[in-house]
């Protein structure tokens, strides 16, 4: 299933088309869409984590200057709920979020009212004039309180537990009974999230003559979101146009269906005007999805020689106040990919999803995978040390061998979902990583003290699932002037898909890339069906659909040329945008295009791709301040097929630095009353340019995916998956003399300092 | 995050500015660089009726170096201190500490007077003013007064400034050549407010003993302050490992930080002592 | 209030509320939407513009405080014909993905290199630490700014001669 031609563009570091506008400040993000008469919305949000709305009176606010409308649940009528998009299940239904709080609030940040005014500032002014009284209820501040169930968050549910996923494979209990060695540890990953640079935003316009809704700022999954909105608001999906503008990052968080995705279109119809809402950073931090708050008690069972026999564990995820569209995916993935790249025959992993009075959680780049890798790689490191086995040898012996592909991971119940590693040689990426890192030299630094800083190294292996099905659509158009346009249902959140799809289309059609006039994506007017940008799927799914469309377009071009040449279609040679007949007569595509030729392609696939690789890090720790410095970080990943090495490298390095943020800096901290304490970017600490200067990435394409015609594998998340485990293991290596064993992230200076103190005091 | 509405005035003299502040009786706020105030306004943590912009008032942006020390006008920016080549000799502690303030863009607008008036407990300028025994010159409706920096700060984000008063200058006493000093701070990221910081300096007598020891701490207390117990542990002694250890112990015993979001009290206490050791190790080199 | 200042070499006269930030004035009153707002509280650097040649956060400055000043935005550092050497270096080094932080990076780096065309990697990282980027991990950005130094050195020499 490989392409017939030698590729000119696939694999080349083509400079991105997108950059030409972004670098000049000419990107059009949602707040940049020109619209002379739009109104502006501001949202009143609960400042109480759990309570009953006793007074809600907007009379005074409606009189404020510039105010056009104030919308509360009363104006909406029966309040719609936001359905679950991924892995829906009956037990989850009581926990879904209403689009606005009618009588009860469950987290700080939950929408209560929408003010529409002539300016954003005046809309904010009027928020202060809304009379609101909330009678506080006891707060479910953490997982313990949630599991105890003394306070039930949802009257319709018997507990605060949404579901428990079971990852199952083999017979873990038997394996543990017969094992030479077992160890049990408790780990936790802190609540943190994507914080894409452009906050969310929506502009909606209601056309009362035609009954049409136009929505700007669509992202990630515009087609499913259109369906959700259509059902809630009672408008035919065909009359809703979702327009994808430039989007300032997504990482899983942007583009899910949030309450505002109903409230702003509703407001636009309510006032009969265009209404724009641009999320500010304060509300982004309390309203957009959080992620990653999972703790896990994990056991490993091994033979004396280090062969892993089984994993057994129990994890609890803090899902926040509601089950959102994709909220279950992170915890579900913990159960599924716990074993990662290792051949583990017996797995018994339960993951409880618990509701609390915090901002709801959703997916953030490599959901569940970052967490699971931290748990697993820490425990493996401890087990290797306990057994006196070199930690690399330990990993190498347990990696899934090439001969075992496709390799089944644990089955997840309920849903009985299974997935397989599709292809690869996991030892090859481990060895390459060690070579690139110069493990032989650097590992001599383990535990070394240099001017008061202690040095440590670590390496971890991982797999990255990608390319979720079920389907993606693409349309290729040969324009009358001989140029080509590509329309794809996949979305862009800044990954460079315009360039990627142009590369794929140009190669598939054998035309110079300059012929690609435009690549459009993500807007519902372009192709009949589309799915979006999540789970590292845009390149693989959209790209494969482009290939299919290209084959069909080529057949049309060939047929037209054959008619002109009076020969069989097979006798026509297509090259560089020219059709050449048997007598060597040449016709440019422009002369064959007529009014334009259109070909629709599609790609259906239920089988996922698995990129894989290894990361290594060299850190030093100042035991007196607890500061961790990263001196070198090397990532090696096999992605099956590289479309654009520059954009791929950008994904890898960017993801690693995000992972370093999650490992060392970022933390959404709540107090016992459900108040977010890290409510600004001065308190929520993201990596800056001076934090992690040395990041190196190497991409390989040794083992193409057999499950799609490109041979490509999703590669947007691999960079972040192993970072927590690698860094924590490197810190443990640096502080091995003290016996420091980090089990919780982030490894902030106070936490590392406290670990050192505790270890020293424990020894006294 | 748009501020609540306010009026705006940009007077041309101190007298006019003070009169505006007095007339609004607490409802007006001065603004210069605005690098602290603007975010306070954006979060609507303050909603003044009037902002009095000090940007047009002449004479507030001078750095004067003379026999009586270094005088910084209230509107001197971090950038001005960074670019003034004289200060590395005239007041090396000031130059070193100010190098830690915030980021490039903020440094182009943030001012000395604004930082003193904002009184963040982790800010460098207030800490330097206190440890050096600076004098802060203030003008208000009832005239001019001078307040010792040690008495200026009354708590986190709190000072003795009346609502009609403006800082016009801060004077740091002369810095003798040969003075030993060290400045150490620890922040989560470059440019962040410090989890703790220590400024330490002393002169030495003919026998090499430390005289007039000053140790100041930021970030680990509710306002910048000196650490008399740590100073006493060094005063009149040779600054060697033993003396440094004694000063560090005194620091641990006397610093009483609050627990907060970013660090527990025990961490900040230990950090202050560690930074003191490092500052003194640098000072004695 | 009416405020008058130069924007990208042109005279602007705008009626604004005193509370309007320079960023909102540029974006919504003058249509210069290349200046981006990502935090509005002075942390992220996306809104960086040049005021009298110095890089400032336009969310931390009132529009009325720009009276009589000269403001340059990313649009003012761009032309239709070709990318500037700094912009071309960003493209070559894949120093941007979603593009949202990019205008602030360009304006900040331009101010730095204009003043310090020999800035080393550490200085560049220090200065850019006031600009958050969530996509790139900064590696390409630093490489791009390092490469662009050559063009600014030439520029400075020209100005001196």
Image: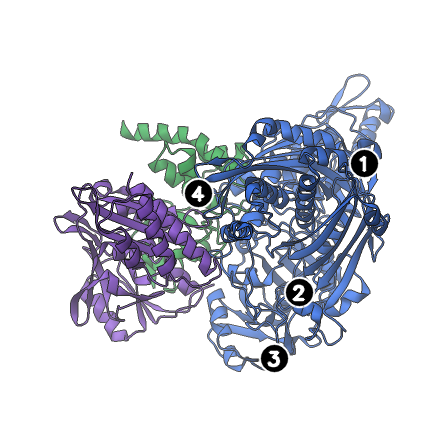
Chain colours: A blue, B purple, C green
Task: Using the image as rendered, state which of residue A699 and residue A630 is in the foreground.
Answer: A630
Alpha carbon distance from label 4 to label 2? 39 Å
Image side of residue A70 versus residue C31, left or right: right
Residue farthest along the front direction in this orientation: A764
* Chain letter behind tag 2: A
Q: Nearer the viewer, mark 1 or mark 2?
A: 2
Where's residue C14, x and y in %? Answer: 37, 58
Q: What residue do we see at 44% from left, 45% from top? A: C129
Graded by Cα atoms within 10 Å as few (under 14), some (14 to 19) or many (20 or more), the crowding at tag 2 reads many
Whole-angstrom CA distance, mark 4 to mark 3, is: 45 Å
Q: Return the disc, 3 or 1, that comes first in the chain's sequence.
A: 3
Q: Position of residue B186 (x, y in %)?
A: 41, 49
Q: Are marks 2 and 3 in contact (CB under 8 Å)?
A: no
**Mark 3 element type:** strand
* Quadrant of the rendering where the N terminus of chain A is positioned: top right
Q: Secondary structure at mark 1?
A: helix
- Residue C128 is marked as 4
Q: Nearer the viewer, residue A477 or B190?
A: B190
**Residue C101 as seen in the image, left or right of residue B28:** right
For the residues beneath circles 4 and 3, the answer to whether they share a chain is no
Q: Which mark is residue A53?
A: 3
For the residues beneath circles 2 and 3, the answer to whether they share a chain is: yes
Q: Quadrant of residue A191?
A: bottom right
Residue wearing tag 2: A143
Task: Give the mark toward the camera: 4 or 2.
Answer: 2
Q: Is residue A396 visible?
A: yes
């Amino acid at each position: 299933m490989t392409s017939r031609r030698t590729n000119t563009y696939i694999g080349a570091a083509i400079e991105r088309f997108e950059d030409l506008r972004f670098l000049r400040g000419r990107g059009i993000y949602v707040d940049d869409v020109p619209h002379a008469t739009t109104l502006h919305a501001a949202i009143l949000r609960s400042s109480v984590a759990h309570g009953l709305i006793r007074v809600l009176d907007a009379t005074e606010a409606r009189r404020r200057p510039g105010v056009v409308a104030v919308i509360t649940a009363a104006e909406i009528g029966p309040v719609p709920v936001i359905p679950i998009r991924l892995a829906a299940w009956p037990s989850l239904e009581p926990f879904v979020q209403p689009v606005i709080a009618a009588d009860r609030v469950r987290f700080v940040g939950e929408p209560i009212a929408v003010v529409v005014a002539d300016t954003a500032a005046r809309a904010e002014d009027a928020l202060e004039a809304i009379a609101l009284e909330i009678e506080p209820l006891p707060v479910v501040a953490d997982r313990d309180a949630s599991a105890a169930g003394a306070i039930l968050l949802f009257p319709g549910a018997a507990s605060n537990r949404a579901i428990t996923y079971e990852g199952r494979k083999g017979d873990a209990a038997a394996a543990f009974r017969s094992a030479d060695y077992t160890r049990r540890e408790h780990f936790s990953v802190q609540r943190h999230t994507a914080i894409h640079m452009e906050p969310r935003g929506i502009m909606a316009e209601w056309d009362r003559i035609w009954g049409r809704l136009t929505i700007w700022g669509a992202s990630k999954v515009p087609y499913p979101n259109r369906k959700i909105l259509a059902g809630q608001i009672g408008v035919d999906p065909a009359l809703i146009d979702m327009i994808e503008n430039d989007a300032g990052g997504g990482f899983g968080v942007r583009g899910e269906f949030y309450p505002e995705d109903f409230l702003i279109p509703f407001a636009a119809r309510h006032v009969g005007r265009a209404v724009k809402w641009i999320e500010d950073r304060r509300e982004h931090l309390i309203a957009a999805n959080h992620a990653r708050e999972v703790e896990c008690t994990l056991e490993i069972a091994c033979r004396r020689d280090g062969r892993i026999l089984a994993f057994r564990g129990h994890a609890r995820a803090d899902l926040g106040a509601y089950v959102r569209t994709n909220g279950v995916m992170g915890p579900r993935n913990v159960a599924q990919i716990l074993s990662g790249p290792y051949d583990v025959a017996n797995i018994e992993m339960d993951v409880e999803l618990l509701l609390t009075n915090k901002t709801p959680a959703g997916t953030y780049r490599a959901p569940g995978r970052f967490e699971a890798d931290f748990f697993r790689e820490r425990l493996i490191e401890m087990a290797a040390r306990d057994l006196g086995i070199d930690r690399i040898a330990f990993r190498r012996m347990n990696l899934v061998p090439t001969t075992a592909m496709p390799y089944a991971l644990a089955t997840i119940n309920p849903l009985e979902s299974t997935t397989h590693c599709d292809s690869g040689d996991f030892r090859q990426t481990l060895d390459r990583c060690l070579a690139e890192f110069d493990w032989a030299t650097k590992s001599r630094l383990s535990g070394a003290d240099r001017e008061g800083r202690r040095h440590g190294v670590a390496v971890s292996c991982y797999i990255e699932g990608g390319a979720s099905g079920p389907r993606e659509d693409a349309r290729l158009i040969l324009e009358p002037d001989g140029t080509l346009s590509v329309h794809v249902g996949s979305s862009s959140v800044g990954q460079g898909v315009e360039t990627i799809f142009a590369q794929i289309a140009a190669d598939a059609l054998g035309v110079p890339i300059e012929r690609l006039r435009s690549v459009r994506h993500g807007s519902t007017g372009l192709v009949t069906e589309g799915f979006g940008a999540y789970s590292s799927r845009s390149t693989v799914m959209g790209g494969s659909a482009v290939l299919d469309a290209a084959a069909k377009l080529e057949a049309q071009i060939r047929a037209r040329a054959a008619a002109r040449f009076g020969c069989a279609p097979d006798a026509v040679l297509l090259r560089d945008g020219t059709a050449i007949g048997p007598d060597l007569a040449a016709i440019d595509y422009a002369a064959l295009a007529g009014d334009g030729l259109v070909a629709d392609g599609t790609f259906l696939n239920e089988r996922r791709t698995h990129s894989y690789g290894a990361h290594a890090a060299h850190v030093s720790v100042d035991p007196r301040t607890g500061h961790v410095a990263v001196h070198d970080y090397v990532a090696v990943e096999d992605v099956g097929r590289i479309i654009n090495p520059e954009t791929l490298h950008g994904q890898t390095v960017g993801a690693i630095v995000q992972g370093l943020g999650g490992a060392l800096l970022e933390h959404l901290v709540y107090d016992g009353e459900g108040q977010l304490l890290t409510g600004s970017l001065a308190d929520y600490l993201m990596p800056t340019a001076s934090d992690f200067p040395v990041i190196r990435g190497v991409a390989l394409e040794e083992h193409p995916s057999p499950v799609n015609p490109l041979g490509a594998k999703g590669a947007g998340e691999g960079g972040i998956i192993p970072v927590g485990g690698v860094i924590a293991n490197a810190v443990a290596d640096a502080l091995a003399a003290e016996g420091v064993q980090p089990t919780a992230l982030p490894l902030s200076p106070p936490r590392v300092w406290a670990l050192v103190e505790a270890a020293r005091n424990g020894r006294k | 995050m748009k501020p609540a509405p306010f009026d705006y005035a940009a007077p041309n003299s101190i007298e006019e500015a003070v009169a505006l502040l007095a007339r609004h009786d607490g409802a007006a706020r001065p603004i210069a660089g605005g690098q602290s105030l603007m975010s306070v306004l954006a979060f609507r943590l303050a909603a003044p009726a009037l902002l009095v912009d000090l940007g047009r008032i002449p004479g507030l942006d001078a750095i004067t170096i003379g026999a009586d020390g270094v005088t910084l006008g209230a509107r001197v920016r971090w950038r001005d201190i960074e670019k003034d080549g004289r200060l590395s000799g005239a007041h090396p502690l000031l130059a070193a500490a100010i190098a830690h303030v915030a980021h490039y863009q903020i440094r182009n607008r943030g001012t000395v007077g604004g930082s003193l008036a904002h009184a963040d407990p982790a800010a460098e300028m207030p800490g330097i003013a206190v440890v050096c025994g600076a004098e802060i010159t203030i003008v208000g409706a009832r005239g001019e007064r001078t307040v010792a920096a040690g008495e200026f700060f009354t708590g986190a984000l709190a000072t003795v400034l009346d609502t009609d008063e403006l800082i016009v200058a801060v004077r740091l006493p002369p810095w003798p050549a040969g003075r030993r000093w060290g400045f150490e701070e620890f922040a989560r990221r470059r440019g962040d407010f410090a989890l703790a910081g220590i400024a330490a300096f002393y002169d030495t007598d003919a026998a090499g003993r430390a005289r007039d020891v000053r140790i100041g701490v930021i970030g680990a207390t509710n306002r910048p302050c000196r650490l008399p117990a740590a100073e006493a542990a060094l005063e009149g002694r040779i600054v060697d490992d033993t003396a440094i250890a004694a000063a560090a112990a005194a620091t641990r015993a006397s610093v009483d930080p609050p627990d907060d979001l970013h660090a527990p009290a025990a961490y900040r206490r230990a950090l202050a002592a560690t930074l003191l050791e490092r500052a003194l190790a640098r000072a004695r080199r | 209030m009416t405020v008058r200042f130069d924007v990208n070499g042109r005279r602007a006269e705008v009626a604004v509320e005193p509370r309007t930030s320079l960023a909102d004035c540029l974006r919504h009153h003058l249509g210069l939407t290349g200046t981006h707002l990502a935090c509005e509280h002075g942390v992220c650097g996306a809104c960086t513009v040049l005021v009298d040649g110095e890089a400032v956060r336009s969310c931390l400055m009132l529009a009325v405080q720009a009276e009589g000043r000269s403001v340059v935005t990313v649009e003012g550092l761009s032309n239709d014909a070709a990318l500037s050497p700094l912009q071309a270096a960003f493209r070559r080094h894949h120093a941007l993905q979603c593009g949202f932080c990019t205008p602030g990076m360009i304006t900040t780096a331009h101010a730095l290199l204009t003043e310090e065309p020999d800035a080393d990697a550490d200085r560049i990282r220090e200065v850019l630490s006031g600009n958050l980027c969530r996509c790139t991990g900064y590696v390409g950005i630093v490489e791009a700014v390092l490469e662009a130094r050559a063009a600014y050195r030439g520029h400075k020499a020209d100005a001196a001669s």
